[in-house]
Image: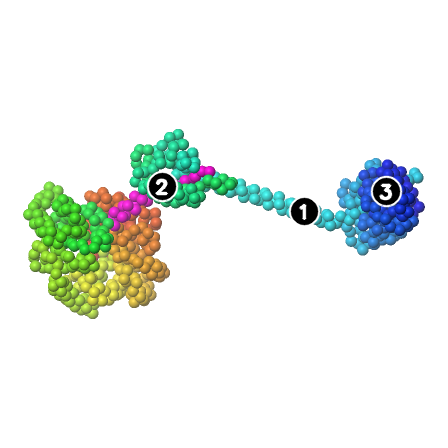
Amino acid sequence: MHLLKKLLKSVDCTQKWIKTRAIFQRLRRKAGLHVTICYEYLCDTFLVHFGTIVVMKQSPNFLLDVLNQSTDMIFVLRLCDDRLEYMNETAQKELGYSFEALRTLGVMSIRQPMNPNKESFLRHLDELKREGALIDYAVLRRKDGSSFAVEARVKHVVSEGEDYNIAIVHDISVRLEQEHKLFEVNQQLESLVVERTAELEAQMRLLENYKEALDESNIVSKSDLSGRIIEVNEKFVQVSGYSREELLYRPHNVVRHPDTPREVFEELWRTILDKKVWKGIVKNRSKSGGSYWVDMIIKPLLDKSGEIEAFIAVRHDITETIEQREAIQRSAYVDALTGLPNRTRLQLDLRALQAPSVALLNVDGFSKLNDFYGHLFGDRIIMALAQRMREQLSGALTLYHLHADEFLVLNRYLHKERFVEMIQQLITMLNATLLPVETTLLRIEVSGSLSFEPVNELLSSVDIALKQVKKRQDRLLVYTPELSISSDFERNMLWSEKLKRAIDEGRIVAYYQPIVDNATMQISKYEALVRLIDEEGAVFTPYHFLSVAKRSKQYRSITKAMIRSAFATVALMQESISINLSIDDVLDPVLQNYLEEMLGSYGVGPKVILELLESEGIENFEAVAVFIAKMKGYGCCVAIDDFGTGYSNFGYLMRLQADFIKIDGSMIRRLEHDANARIIVETIVGFAKRMGIQTVAEFVENEAIFQTVQEIGIDFSQGYYFAPPAAIPLRQTAT
């Protein structure tokens, strides 16, 4: 205690203590009370700082009380021999040693330097003598063996010629733990920043690649609020035909095509000025005056305040797609041979009229002309006849080419008597004149029928009347109900009986026509075609009995007979064979079960191709898709028959997952002399190749057609050029 008082007395001699001591003395004199100072040993000079002054009862040992109650550990060591001269109660409690015990052991026994450069306590004391004051970090070991990190604020004090070390020691374990956690967090943050930076750089590279791809395949422009072009990519320049300088700062209507309605652009501007994205298909015009179609998206670009600062437009050139769609639409509604509207177009037109009437015209003995002159010459007869009739008909009458030698005239509004009169005059004129066909003048005979029945009975009634014309060898008849009763009943009864006997006696058989691989010239597969053999051995095609079979509910039996016959042939000869199925067949649960039963019995699924008749519209695509998936589970393939007419479209193919397309024979037969037919076929083949679908050309009747088919790139051919349908599949190389 005497030494501590001496040390404190020495401390009092400093300037900072003199002022403080004088304050204490004045307080004592004035108040007659003793002053206790709660302090922290943190003075700039002595590491001692006096804080708040608290008035309390006088005590001679108040300074020792303050030191013992300090939250910090306080040590006083004599530097000459490292002897511990003082240790407050806080230090004794924290370390577990009494003053006497630690004095005996020495501070060096419980202290380890935290800084590895300070290898010993002696070096620490030497540094203190040199510096006079320092802050040191060390680890102290308690009596129980545990240790903790401390921060020591140390002052070198000289009293009566002796050197002392006064140290205020603070436990910094919690602080170090927090600093360590902070360090780990910082490390994690740094690692995260590095990772995010790498991701951002990768995204930037990806965006650059996207931009390059966008510029390469799309037409991109940027415009100001008034629609003036302020930026274009190279693709815009190429497609539009304008230079960049010609485009910049000009309005976008520089490429606007007059065919595009003004309403489209009015709606476009309303949308983008409302800060919404506009999407649509627009026809544009190039500098040369040509046109091109684009699928366009326009997006407003907003600034930080959410206001529009510019617009960006991205266009994809879909000209080829539009042209293909138009070609397919033409093929769906226009007859490829004559250029006249076809039966599909007629059906649509009839629905739009309230009380139409029709005339059906047919060339007498046309099959004989075909046999005598050949099919190509027969096509030219039909083309010349179509041109002659088109020249004679007025605007109220529309001419359609339905099939082969059949034409139909639609009367939209002429009075009944006038319509009959005009058809009579037309037939008389055609029969009285020679028709120029190539270098030949040919006389033909035409007969016809008319019907004024309701729309839903119009076509069937005019067909009945024409049959009666042929039967009676007349020139023209107007349909009456009596004609329907006499003709249909007689014919239906005859064929219904024929069919029943043929089914019962097993005379519904399959004939097989080979399908040739165009690359190898080998027979690849066969199509099974239904035939009826009558009691005398005559062979009849389905043209004669199929419609009667449907009306007399014998159609299912015919389909079963075909499946059974074809599967037996596949099993016997191990040849791939295709079978025709109508949409009614596909949706018939009884036939589905029978087909699955036969597939299971014969095990010939991978050798079977199911041809769906494309000429029949599909309304329940979901049910058809389920059927196809089930059949493919047996290994069967799917083909779309007669593709290119009727209901055909590319979406149809994708939804049905077809393996083969059989291109309609009416277009194949015209390939060598009809440019439009070739364009349509090439479009179909190109689409099929991109979709991985193989193509088959039907009605390949001569070498010229076959060579054209090969040039276009069709995979397979079928027709009389190779072989007619036969009762037994041919096993030979195509010639």
Let me know if residue 49 appears in the view: yes
Residue 165, numbered circle: 3
Given contact means CB atoms under 8 Å apart, are the residues at marks 3 and 1 in contact?
A: no
Q: Which residue is mark 1?
A: 182
Disc 2 and disc 1: Cα gap in Å? 60 Å
Q: Earlier in the sequence, mark 2 or mark 1?
A: 1
Number of residues whose C-alpha sits closer than 10 Å to that of mark 1, classed few (under 14), some (14–19) or many (20 or more): few
Q: Residue 316 lies in magenta, yes or no?
A: yes
Q: Position of residue 699 (x, y in %)?
A: 21, 51
Amino acid carrying mark 1 in the image: Leu
Q: Residue 484 lies in magenta, yes or no?
A: no
- Name the residue at the top extreme: 245
Q: Earlier in the sequence, mark 3 or mark 1?
A: 3
Does 286 sit above or below residue 671?
above
Q: Position of residue 110 (x, y in %)?
A: 82, 49
In the image, 460 versus 541, the foreground residue is 460
Is 156 situated left or right of 410 in this image?
A: right
Q: Secondary structure at mark 3?
A: strand
Amino acid carrying mark 3 in the image: Asn
x 35%, y 43%: residue: 264
The residue mark sitting in front, 2 or 1, is: 2
